[in-house]
Amino acid sequence: MDTTTPAPSRSTARTKSGKNQNACDACRSRKVRCIYDGENLTCQGCLFLEINCTRQRPRRKRGPPNRHAQLPERIVGAEAASPTPGVQLMALANPALLNASLSNPSLAVVSLSNQSLSNISLSNPSLSTASLSNASPLSHTSPGVVAASPCSSGSTRPPREPSILQPGPWLGSFAPDAVVSRMLGHWFDKVHPVAPILLRRRFMRRLRNGDAGTDRQFCGLVVSVCAAVAATLPREDHSSVTVSRCLEFIEHNNLLASGFALKAYSLDWCIAMYNLGTAMGAVSDSGLGDMRSFHATSEAAAGVRYLAYYCTHDLDNAEKQLLKRLFWLLFAASCSANILGRLPISLLSQELIDSIPRPLDLTDDQMEPQGLLESDHHVAWYGDSTSYVPGLNSLSDLFKVWHEVQLTPPTPDPSACLGRYLSRVQQVIDNLPPELRWRGGLSRPPSVTQGHEVQIANIFITSLHVRSNLLQKLDPSRRSVLEHQRIVDDLLEILYHLPQAVFNANGSSVVPKIRDIGAAYLEQVEKGGTGEADGDSARGKLERLLRKLDDLDCWQGLGVLEAIQPGHVGSVYSVDTPASDLSMGGSSGL
């Protein structure tokens, strides 16, 4: 009887040839044998690759740490590091906060809301004072603000300044009340005629009622007015208030949100951004080409467009008039930048600009009559019964003529086109109201204020600048030398007859225009090949023009001196200065 040995079954063979359960992760992923010596903790494959071997580690602890398993450890660590142990535990006892911490480990340790704080105080009275009075992270955050623990992430974010989160008042920490009141008085007495965008009675009433301590945008508006005054009237005493100080204060206290942080446009915000844009352009070496000035003015233009298109029904009659005034001031600023070779702001197309109505010729008393309750607080002001809107509308007419020329295609007869537009500029000057007409050396009538003289200087110098630019664009030939000469004669007449205070109120807005007119005249003189007598006459006119520029272009002080590099050329030029250098530099508001 034959005896045969039974063949081993497949199941038995599979059992004997089982996988090595102690293989390291590297060999297992590469699907190779994990060969190692009994005494060596690292297998030969990992030793060859010079990597860490995981053979001796339990398989359940080889992967990335489990955030759910590590949550108790983080809680214990946070409790040990916190000056108020138990606060974080009570916060995580809230199911909503616990779920949020599981989905986002960086929020595992959070600050408490008012409700959780009250629960802590009731359950543990010893924590009620420790968590609020001690140097705890909760003591510098407002209710509802989530503050991550320094242990929650590798990179700790610096805490925000307390003044940003705390409510006002802010104005008291900006400057003394006397300084702010003096600067606001300078605005309404000297700057308001060229920028009538504030209703004084309403503005001062809001200031007395304490709106600057509760309304961030209104406080930012007040500070922006101070910045505009500091830039426009650098010769006045403003204590420690400068444009840089105003910008730092607004940014530090988050008074004027910008970009995506802005929730809604308002008239206060638009006026404040316009003031800041003109102030930064006035003190910057780049003038209207300053990046921050361009950004602020562009944001003001965007807000004005939005309010005019969507929100006019939310504005009262006085606010609608102020919005129109601000729009045409922005239009003038855009045209001025374009004439001087700077990037203009984007406002509206020519068709839409023509459809924008002009502001009405209304005084402050007509826009908002004085109430009986404020009769004791309101101080009489010459602007209550005087309107400066006609001057603003005339300035807009001048810039509209120039703007229309830029959109006109070239014509075969440029001389006729030039004559037509020059006559329109002269028509605007001829149609000025009596209080804005040129009187030469005659004394002003009783109805004419110094604010009207400020507007006269601005309007007439702007008209000469527009005429000079049109000559350069439409007739850059030698025949235009005589016309440029007449423009310079009129400019010198204005500069040497109006008082210095008139030009001080215009700030630096007229300085680049005067430079540009002088540069165009010098360029034509160099091309004209005039005789010796005419050359001496032109030299004398340019010398008088440069002397006046030295008086108008006010030195900003030691801060500017420290920023001047060696070899920097200031506002003092010689008559032999090239025309291109004469037109450079300076800053402008409008």
Image (cartoon, rainbow, N blue to C red):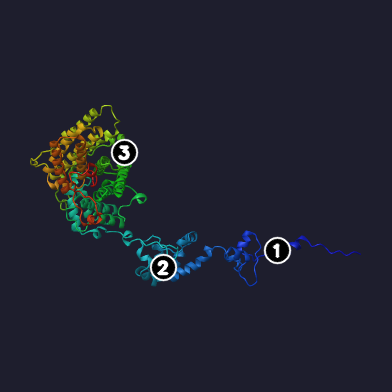
Residue at x 39% of width, y 68% of height: 121
| Residue under the point 41% across and 68% down | 120
Classed neighbour count for the residue bearing mark 1: other residues with Cα under 10 Å, few (<14), some (14–19), many (≥20): few
Three-letter amino acid code of the residue under disc 2: Ile
Q: Earlier in the sequence, mark 2 or mark 3?
A: 2
Image quarter of residue 112: bottom left
Q: Position of residue 301 (x, y in %)?
A: 30, 44
Residue sitting nearer the eye, 445 or 523: 523
Of pointers 1 and 2, the one earlier in the residue sequence: 1
Q: Is residue 85 left or right of residue 40?
A: left
Q: Secondary structure at mark 1?
A: loop
Task: Evaluate if marks 1 and 3 touch, with contact meaning CB atoms under 8 Å apart.
Answer: no
Q: Which mark is residue 120?
A: 2
Give the amino acid at mark 1. Answer: Gly
Marks 1/3: CA–CA distance = 80 Å
* Element type at mark 3: loop
For the N terminus, the quadrant is bottom right
Residue 537 image offset from top left, x and y in percent? 13, 38
Distance between mark 1 and mark 2 Cα atoms? 58 Å
Residues marked 2 and 3 touching at CB (< 8 Å): no
Residue 252's place in the image compared with 440, above or below, is below
Front disc: 1 or 3: 1
Q: Is residue 441 above or below residue 116?
A: above
Q: Which residue is mark 3?
A: 348
Task: Give the class, few, some or many, for how many residues have Cα within 10 Å of label 2's Cα (few <14, many ≥20).
Answer: some
Labels 1 and 3: the sequence-earlier one: 1
Q: Which numbered tag is attached to residue 18?
A: 1
